[in-house]
Amino acid sequence: MGIDVWVKRGAPRVAALPVQPVTSGVVNQAPAPAQVSKRTAEPPRATAVAPEASVAIQLECVSGPGAVLVGALSGAADLRLARDIVQAIAGPDAALQRTAFRWPQTQSGDTSPAGASSAYAGFLRGQTDRASARCLLLLGAAATELADSVELANGAAVLRCAAATSIRADFAAKKALWLAISKFAVP
């Protein structure tokens, strides 16, 4: 009859494994199909290659006179929170600018974490100098992880905060943030 596979009725079905995106630190091989045996189904394994993998970063920056905020802003509510924070420091009539930091950049052949850290530090220095910032706010782990060695020439204070979605969800975090930035606000 052309039936190649026999499956016992009532036997547990093995679901297809979800496809995981492959990072550049992992060998780009086609995953082997899941083998169904009487005992178990084992997922395919990937092999690590290089110790130095490339880094992909996408951060948004909102700045105004006296303040720069950088973080992963995932939606309109996060962007609104970022604008409110910067306007609280810069003043309600201040013109705000929105820029982005993307890594890897097409001009650079270096995609290493050290190259990303160096480019990010230059980006932060440039944004704080342009805005004459008294305060640099870094929202979330993505914005703070690469900024450990950043030294700002103008002496701006660096505030490391939780991610924007966490701040919006937690009243205590919101209150702590507003109290922290109140000393930088324009009188």
Image (cartoon, rainbow, N blue to C red):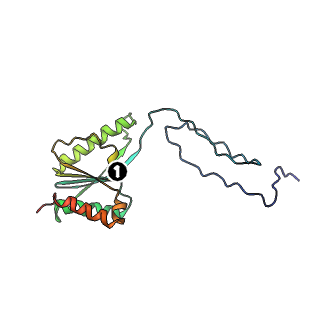
Q: Which quadrant of the view contains residue 45? A: top right
The extreme bottom residue here reads 171
Tell me if residue 80 can be seen.
no
The extreme right residue here reads 1
In percent of the image, x 71 and y 46: which residue is there? 35
For the residue pair 94 and 175, the one nearer the viewer reads as: 175
For the residue pair 41 and 152, the one nearer the viewer reads as: 41
In percent of the image, x 86 and y 51: which residue is there? 2
Total numbered badges shown on the rendered structure: 1
Callout 1 secondary element: strand
Tell me if residue 175 can be seen.
yes
Q: Would residue 59 be found to the left or right of residue 92 on screen?
A: right
Q: Amino acid at mark 1?
A: Leu
The extreme top residue here reads 50
Q: Would residue 18 be found to the left or right of residue 129 on screen?
A: right
Where's residue 128, x and y in %?
Answer: 20, 48
> What quarter of the picture does the C terminus occupy?
bottom left
In percent of the image, x 43 and y 38: which residue is there? 54
Where's residue 99, x and y in %?
Answer: 29, 52
Where's residue 81, x and y in %?
Answer: 29, 63
Q: Would residue 63 be found to the left or right of residue 41 on screen?
A: left
Is residue 135 depicted above or below 76 in this figure?
above
The extreme left residue here reads 187
Q: Residues within 10 Å of mark 1 (few under 14, many from 20)?
A: some
Name the residue that disc number 1 marks. 59
Where's residue 175, x and y in %?
Answer: 26, 65
In percent of the image, x 34 and y 53: which residue is there? 140
Is residue 152 depicted above or below 182 in this figure?
above
